[in-house]
Image (cartoon, rainbow, N blue to C red):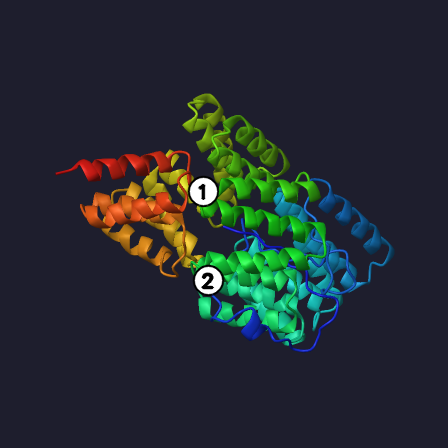
Amino acid sequence: MHRPEDRPAPAIPRRRRLRTTVITLALGAVMFTVGAVGLSPAGSGTPDTADTTVSASGPARGAEALRERVRRLPKDPVGWADLGMALVQQARTTADQAAYDRAETALRRSLALQPAENLHAEIGMGALAAARHRFREALTWARRAVATSPATPASYGVLADAHTQLGQYRRAEEAVQKMADLRPDSSSLARASYTYELRGDTRQARTLMERALRAAGTPGERAFAHTHLSSLALDSGDPATALRQARAGLAVVPRDPGLLEARAKAHAARGESRQAVADYTAAVAVAPLPQYLLELGELQESLRHQDEAEGLYAVLRAQETLRRAAGAPADVDAILFEADHGDPRRAVTMAEAAVRERPFIAVHDAYAWALHRAGRDEQALEQADRALALGTRSALFLYHRGAVHQALGDTTSARRDLRRALSLDPSFHPLHAPAARTAVRRIDNTP
């Protein structure tokens, strides 16, 4: 789902009046990942400063500068920790899996030099574990970081992200509130925004993300805020605003893959298929992540460009082979791809393993869809209900549940979910949105 960057502040202010002015409800869950949780104190002397600019060459340049630093100061634990975080950022933005191994080597070198109360390395190890979807491990490191420095906002960011992915939403609420109380900056406001989004309050989510944009101190933070303002607009059926936000972000960070994806989605929603394909292709060139590959492949399939779609699906299958060989957990996109374009029974197996390790709502949704595609609709309905339990306004989740209801013969519930999906975002998926409209017509025409 979403990937906010975390740039904790350089100093800890006194507690501010955020509880009543910003977060008036108990905060919900936070999901800031597509294979990663955002947190980038790389290149700083403390974990309270970071530049989270995301570009094709930025992370590599930052890592190289930090390599030179540790060559000059090989006994500096902070330098090794900062190098580790820069490599985590590089892996996240370039899909270079080997960078995660290099990041772990650097972070563990830092811990060897300073085993106790090494805040930089503890935060870094938490972010690394989250990037690898090892959220229980991330939680352990986040708790250790909080114990080391209870007044550091970054620690609570990692803690909140881990709790969220583990389905521990109330604990995530507490961590986000604590982070916001310590410093209501762009990072904490972005997390607060997403908690409201997951609860279905898109108006408050948009308000908080606009505040996050105004508070942004780096190009990366501004790019992130524009990305998610674009997403909020598109999820509300407003592709014109979505396009405007994506363009504004790309003016700041021209090759940011998340912004390229956002602009591609906006173009697709406006029927501008050529521009959408171009933007998705550019995003894949920067970061060949499963999400971008799948979205571009399904867009090409919807355009009847089957050869192009199959080429992208072949890359996804190769990535899945590597994932299985490494024993890494399946991501949501891999499960959905297998369910729709591979073996649904294998998708169920993948989802069962994923939900045990990461019982987050998006994983429940993917599990529901895999079960449905495998013909196990009663079990699918239970998972689909879990995916929507927070009140999230997701057209895709609603479509999935509507299809399950239809398969079970509950046309009343199917019509409700399918119509709501289309009312939220008429172009929510290049293949499923047309299927939803067809299904509604069939239901309406059934005596």
The image shows residue 176 at horizontal and vertical percentages of 55, 68
User: Splitting the image into 4 quarters, where does residue 385 fall?
Assistant: bottom left
Is label 2 in a helix, a strand or a loop? loop
The amino acid type found where label 2 is placed reads Leu
Badge 1, how many Cα within 10 Å: few under 14, some, many 20+? many
Residue 313 visible within the image: no
Q: Residue at x 58, y 57 (%)?
A: 209
- Identify the disc placed on residue 166: 2
Q: Quadrant of residue 375?
A: top left
Task: Give the residue displayed 35% in from the left and 34% down from the top.
Answer: 434
Q: Farthest residue toward the left?
A: 447
Using the image as rendered, state which of residue 274 and residue 88 is in the foreground. 274
Name which of mark 2 and mark 1 comes first in the sequence: 2
Point out residue 294 in the picture as x, y percentages from the top left corner: 48, 36
Q: Is residue 311 above or below residue 60?
A: above
Left or right for 97, reference 323: right
Q: CA distance from mark 2 to mark 1?
A: 19 Å
Task: State the residue at coordinates (72%, 57%).
Answer: 217
Residue sitting nearer the eye, 72 or 378:
378
Identify the image quadrant of the C terminus. top left
On screen, residue 197 above or below 237 = below
Closest to the observer, 446 or 408: 446
Q: Nearer the viewer, residue 387 or 132?
A: 387
The mark found on residue 334 in the picture is 1
